[in-house]
Amino acid sequence: MKTLYLVRHAKSSWSTPGMRDFDRPLNERGMNDAPKMASFLQKLDVVPDLIVSSPAKRAITTARFFAAVFRISEDEIVLNPDIYEAEPAEILRIVSELPESSSAAMIFGHNPTFTDIANRFSEDIIENVPTCGVVCIRSGADKWNELFEGNSRIVASWFPKEVL
């Protein structure tokens, strides 16, 4: 069985006009929500064994907060540039290539892609995966490249405004 956690980056800052989207940092709310969401998940016995992140500043910063709470070294965070601006099919390709030694992976990335992917695995419509929102997809697949809508479902979602 495989478990995939889609984690949208925490709230980012728009305070610097002209800054490249890729370089936007977390704002104060994002800096506050990321460690709190990670701690919340830890209390629910969520235990990722792999963290993969977009290299965009807001995503990798969020991933680092989660890694610290889950006692995963920052050096172990896998940066994948294909996550930034990816379409859902690209994210699912990335998932299909995750190492089989991992059974519970967290991927840190962006909307609208993460909301689109969540809706592929949900019986209900998710209007929006908010910043620092986490969606848990559980699969009966034995291998990451076997994970698809027919054998995988969202089993939980946690959004900061609902749980913090």
Image (cartoon, grey):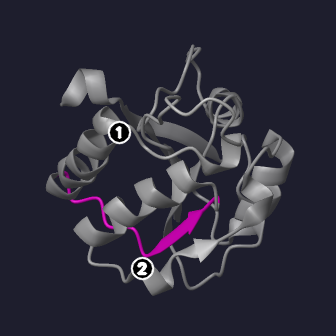
Q: Residues within 10 Å of mark 1 (few under 14, many from 20)?
A: many
Chief secondary structure of the magenta span?
A: loop
* Residue 129 on image: x %, y %: 52, 27
- Residue plotted at (39% across, 68% down): 48
**Helix, strand or loop under label 2:** helix
Q: Does 48 lie within the magenta span?
A: yes
Q: Residues within 10 Å of mark 2 (few under 14, many from 20)?
A: some
Is 24 placed above or below 4 here?
Answer: above
Quadrant housing residue 118: top right
- Residue plotted at (18% across, 31% down): 164
Near-viewer residue (164 or 157): 164
Query: Which residue is outermost to the left?
Result: 43
Q: Which residue corresponds to mark 2?
A: 74
Left or right, residue 68 beside residue 130: left
For badge 2, the amino acid type reads Glu
Near-viewer residue (17 or 101): 17
* Residue 10 on image: x %, y %: 42, 40
* Residue 104 on image: x %, y %: 47, 67
Residue 110: tell me if it is visible: yes
Which stretch appears magenta? 44-54
Asked if marks 2 and 1 touch (Cβ < 8 Å), the reply is: no
Does label 2 or label 1 sit earlier along the sequence?
1
For badge 1, the amino acid type reads Gly
**Helix, strand or loop under label 1:** helix
Is 144 placed above or below 115 here?
Answer: below
Quadrant housing residue 98: bottom right
Distance between the alpha carbons at the discs numbered 2 and 1: 19 Å
Is 141 placed above or below 128 here?
Answer: below
Residue 30's mark? 1
